[in-house]
Image (cartoon, helix red, strand yellow):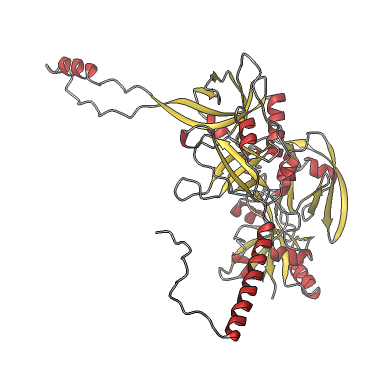
Amino acid sequence: MPHSARAPNRSAKLVQTRSHLLAVAGLALLACVGVATRVDAQRAFVPPPSLAPLADRLSDAVVNISTTQSQKGPQGVPLPKVPKGSPFEEFFDDFFQKRGGKAPPDRKVSSLGSGFVIDPSGLIATNNHVIEGADEIIINFHDGSKLKVEKVIGRDTKTDVALLQVNPKKPLKAVPLGSSSKMQVGDWVMAIGNPFGLGGSVSLGIISAKQRDINSGPYDDYLQTDAAINKGNSGGPLFNMDGEVIGINTAIISPTGGSIGIGFSVPSDTVASVVDQLKQYGEIRRGWLGVKIQTVTEDIAETLGIPENTGALVAGVTPDGPAAKSGIEGGDVILKFDGKDISTMRGLPRVVAQTPIGKSVDVELLRAGQKKTLKVAVGRLVEDDDKAEPAALGKPEKSEKGTGPAVAAMLGLKLATITPELRAKFGLDAKMKGVVVVEIDPQSPAAQKSIKVGDVIVEAAQEQVESPDDVTRGIDKVKKAGRKAVLLRVEDGKGDLRFVAVPVT
């Protein structure tokens, strides 16, 4: 039963003493001050006006998307085997052909999602996963009309964006793409979509966070919102209060499958770039720098003398790639790309991917404690080019250090110069230079940093090494500098380079 204010008790004794009256008056005054304070606090929050006019203006541009696709029917019960020439052979063949002996027909599976019109001529944006594998796509408009998608202009699996084409008899109501970069945490947003197939539904919330990485792809940069997003909202728009699309609703985190106030939208800045390329080329053409990068972790930052999460650390450079041609080297820390700050490792691929191919840009980097700016001509990324076959081992080489390897133990590692025998044993490329790890103490800090037997140490303290003595000199160098770890550049048998900070004390 709801609680309510109760009327005063008429049988209560009246207060007769003056001191008690003054005390009551004082409490009343404090109560008044408290009320005034609460009123002032409430004035700081101004609830938004009715969103009915905005929702009404935008609803015609938001669509429901229904798809159908064929799936193989379930396998039937295996037919009984009868001996060839048996008197029952003809009977069984005739019976099972008439009563399900043939493979069951394919099933038609339907699914629902959302989208929005971005061009009156009939261009519709949505998520790729909404229409993936569909045999037929139908667009359902707010007024009840329907149109069949004539063409999937293009799709991008990396950002989960697709562009569809319908042929309307008259221009459609479209909505513009706004700037997601201008949105701030706490800004009001409105989602319109088709949750659970119910039809056009409106929900209100705020931007809860920006630049969310939910490990769904290499270019994750989601807006997070608490506006209710459920199954069926995928592909629908997230609007700002000016009626501009600032995101495509794509994913939720939920243990139940329903909204718990954690939804994610592809930022409109990303959508605009993808849509422009799909319209122009029918495919995505991303920029390419030609570097392998890693995060500047706390221990690596300490060895470099820079703050944690500063830029992107270059672990390796692709030969003849844009970075190599511009003079970028392994060990460089990229701080800015084309005027945009790179605060984290994952920020660099997003910025490079959205840069026009062939554009010459400034890259600001940190090398050996000094800032430098280089010019780089952005190349074109070839998707899945990391599946190239490894280089051939080549013919055995003569050891540069005599008939046997020079061996030394340090950091819990036993290191050796590379000999033809060790190249063959660990499958090392003929071009690999450095010292190879032949033994490792499983309890050592190096083992905890995932260094393995067969790895090759290429650099120590940002100096190239050719013998275990070179590694020792690198360790002595960082100790004299008062640092707690030595930065090793390590290459595995596949040719993948990475930096590892190993404690030296």
Q: Nearer the viewer, residue 486 or 33?
A: 33
User: In the rendered image, is residue 379 in sight?
Assistant: yes
Image coordinates for residue 272, horizontal then vertical, percent? 71, 34
Above or below: residue 277 compared with residue 465 = above
Question: Residue at left 25%, top 29%?
Answer: 77
Q: Nearer the viewer, residue 28 or 250?
A: 28
Q: Nearer the viewer, residue 402 or 197?
A: 197
Image coordinates for residue 422, horizontal then vertical, percent? 63, 56
Q: Quadrant of the C terminus?
A: bottom right
Q: Quadrant of the N terminus?
A: bottom left
Label count reads 0
User: In the rendered image, is residue 431 in sight?
Assistant: no
Is 497 positioned to the left or the right of 110 in the image?
Answer: right
Image coordinates for residue 186, horizontal then vertical, percent? 67, 51
Image coordinates for residue 474, horizontal then vertical, percent? 77, 68
Quarter of image, res 27: bottom right
Question: Residue at left 48%, top 63%?
Answer: 5
Quarter of image, res 123: top right
Quarter of image, res 441: bottom right
